[in-house]
Image (tube, rainbow, N blue to C red):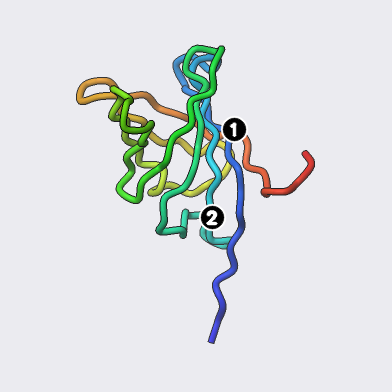
Amino acid sequence: MSETRFLDVRILALWRDDRTECPLTLDLRIDAESRRVISHWETFGACDLNGDKCRPFVLRRDGAMDFGALAREAWRTDLRNVAIKVGERFTVHWNERDVGVYEIVKVASLGAKS
C-alpha cells in the first residue's frame, strides 16, 4: 500500500495586471508528485489590498475567499484546480463581473528559512 507524500507550503502569487497591487499569500498542503492541493479542509491566506494593510481570509473548499462576516467582498478562486508551482496561473473573481489572473511567483516549504 502506497502512502501519499505531501508538502506543506506557503505560496506568493501576484496579480498579472499590476504586480504591486493585492499580492496573495496562502498556506497549502499539496501532493509532492502532482503538486496539486490535497487538503480538503479550509486553509488560511492573506492579501495586501491597498499596500498598507494585510487582510486575512479563509480559502473555502469551494474556492470562496472568506474575509469574514462583516466583509462586503465575495471573492472566488480556482487555485485548488492548478498545480502549485512557480509560473502557474489561476484566477480570482472579485465579484460577478471582475476577474484577475494571478501568477505563483514563490513556493516555499513551511518552516524553511528562505
Image location of residue 87, percent across then percent down? 55, 36
Neighbour tally class for label 2: few under 14, some 14-19, many 20 plus, Cα within 10 Å? many
Is 105 left or right of 68, judged from the image as shown?
right
Task: Name the secondary structure under disc 1.
Answer: strand
Percent position of residue 24, x then y: 51, 30
Q: Amino acid at mark 2?
A: Arg
In-front residue for pair 49/1: 49
Name the residue furthest right: 113
Camera-side residue: 58 or 62? 58
Q: Is residue 35 left or right of residue 59?
A: right
Measured along the vertical axis of the image, is residue 66 above or below residue 30?
above
Which badge, 2 or 1, comes first in the chain's sequence? 2
**Residue that mark 2 sits on:** 29
Q: Between residue 58 and residue 104, name the one nearer to us.
A: 58
The amino acid type found where label 1 is placed reads Val
Q: In percent of the image, x 56 and y 12: which residue is there? A: 52
Residue matched to label 1: 105
Foreground mark, 2 or 1, reads 2
Specify the farthest residue to the front. 70
Tell me the residue at 49%/42% (across/down). 44
Q: Residues within 10 Å of mark 1 (few under 14, many from 20)?
A: some
Name above or below for residue 37 compared with residue 33: above
Q: How far from the left and from the top, in percent, is residue 57?
A: 44, 35
Residue at left offset 58%, top offset 63%: 6
Give the spatial CA distance, label 2 vs label 1.
17 Å
